[in-house]
Amino acid sequence: MYIIARDGSGDFTSIQAAIDAIPMGSREPTILLLRMDEYHERVIVNKDNVRIVGEARDRTVITHSGCAKDLDAEGKEKGTFLSYTLLVTGTNVEVENLTVRNDAGDGRDVGQAVAVYAAGDRGVWRNVRMIASQDTLFCGPTMPKVARDALPRLIPDGVPSVGDCPLTLGRQYFEDCLIQGDVDFIFGPYRCWFERCTLFMNQRGGFYTAANTPEQAAYGLVFHRCRLTGECGAGMAHLGRPWRPFARTVFLACDMDECVSPEGFQDWQGGAPVTERCGEWGTTGARADQSTRHPAQKRLTGEEAALLTVGSVLGGFDHWHPQQRTPTWFLCGDERVAGWAQALGALAEDAFVQTDCAPQGSSKTFVGTMRLNFAELCLRPGDRLLVGFGRHDASADPGVGTDARITFPGYVGMFIDAARRQGAEPVLIAHPEDGDFAASLREVAEARGVRCIEGEPGAEVPLSAAALRMARRVLETLREGAVRGC
């Protein structure tokens, strides 16, 4: 896990620097924790298996002011797809708990200004605010000009044009997000599922969506239990308009207030008309009455709506289901834990292993430097937090050391509480050579109903036989269902 903080208190001062430090082609998941601040940078996530987590959604902001009317080196307008604030081309990238904003301004003045360009596959967005005006969120492949513009950061070339693009297999999942804009502000050809999201129309009014689903694609944009609202006048927000003839957009069990047009979808003037590939079911709120909708718009039956699920829309050849996430095991401790972490990562086929171990670190320094706070932000139900301190808690340095019987149990309790607050399981690691501190860990485990695992002497040496034995011991213990002490 890397911490990004503009004030220099983390591992990196910029998001892009942290992403650039991740090895290209790495299969190991990497977590980037963004401290609360405004990051004025254009960010390109061209690596796979990256999880970006903000410290606080509304106060952790990535912002940029690119727009379609910006000029390139030859004096030509850059266009929509080079205006982004955040471009994600990697696979298995998750973004959580932050804001992505394009501050270029009103589209009538600056043209399109994209906040998020989601170009990868298996992308997950949770509790993210995406704010702009025209063309806020694009879900579709990269183009050669985007790849060239990103150099020296390598990203794959996509289709020559995303207008009439061929079948694209990219998938994106959005949960509890707020997406704000006005004209066509959710657009593109990808398969996307929006769960409990808020779609907020700016005062200008316009279209929530503009899909250009390929003809061969069975699914396009699906909105489930979302809320459609805004600050525009009544009826000024249309559900969408087809960017191309085969656009697929469906709203399921969504709440729509008076901002939404009674007409629902609208034909693209001079372009594609609304077809039955645009549909609606189970609408609630001020615009629940579908009798005034566009005559070509599909009114789904309950049976037809039931066939649209996250699994059917996003599953694909690999049966991806973003709501069924792989658990993460977070290892917090000193250098002894770090020693066998690599072996555990190789053995744990059904979990991701993340290590945040500090040489010369104690439970007190880990809490005092807010590393525990950051780890807690990343924990989710089903995860585990493994805690192994004691060696440096015995230090005579008052800024590092703790008392084995008085303050040490209190610090250990903070780790237990942090894990349980997030629905994760705390697990303690007691190293026999730590004497009273190991005994204290065992007592805390017994009192709090926490599993405790005995450390292996010599396991701090990476790739050693002892490290492998320790990793296997941890794995066997965690696979057991019962909670037990040492």
Image (cartoon, rainbow, N blue to C red):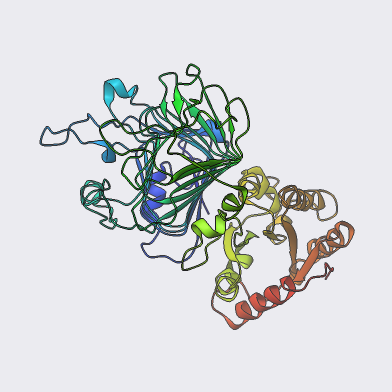
Q: Residue at x 20, y 36 (%)?
A: 78
Q: Quadrant of the C terminus?
A: bottom right
Q: In the displayed structure, would residue 79 be above or below residue 96?
A: above
Q: Is residue 221 left or right of residue 67?
A: right
- Name the outermost residue toward the left: 74
**Residue at left offset 32%, top offset 52%:** 141
- Residue at (74%, 58%) from the top-left corner? 426
Up the image or down, 320 lies above or below 377; here it is below
Residue found at the far bottom of this picture: 465
> Could you say which quadrant of the image residue 77 lies in?
top left
Direction from residue 259 to residue 480 in the image, left or right: right
* Rendered location of residue 201, percent (x, y): 47, 26
Task: Give 402 or 122, whichever is nearer the viewer.
Answer: 122
Total numbered labels placed on residues in the image:
0
Query: Where does residue 136 sit, x and y in percent of width and height?
Result: 39, 34
Along the viewing direction, whichever of 283 and 122 lies nearer the viewer: 283
**Closer-to-camera residue (358/88):** 88
Left or right, 47 with reference to 353 = left
In this rendered view, identify the residue nearer to me: 124 or 213.
213
Q: Is residue 84 visible?
A: yes
Q: Position of residue 131 (x, y in %)?
A: 44, 31
- Residue 369, image quadrant: top right
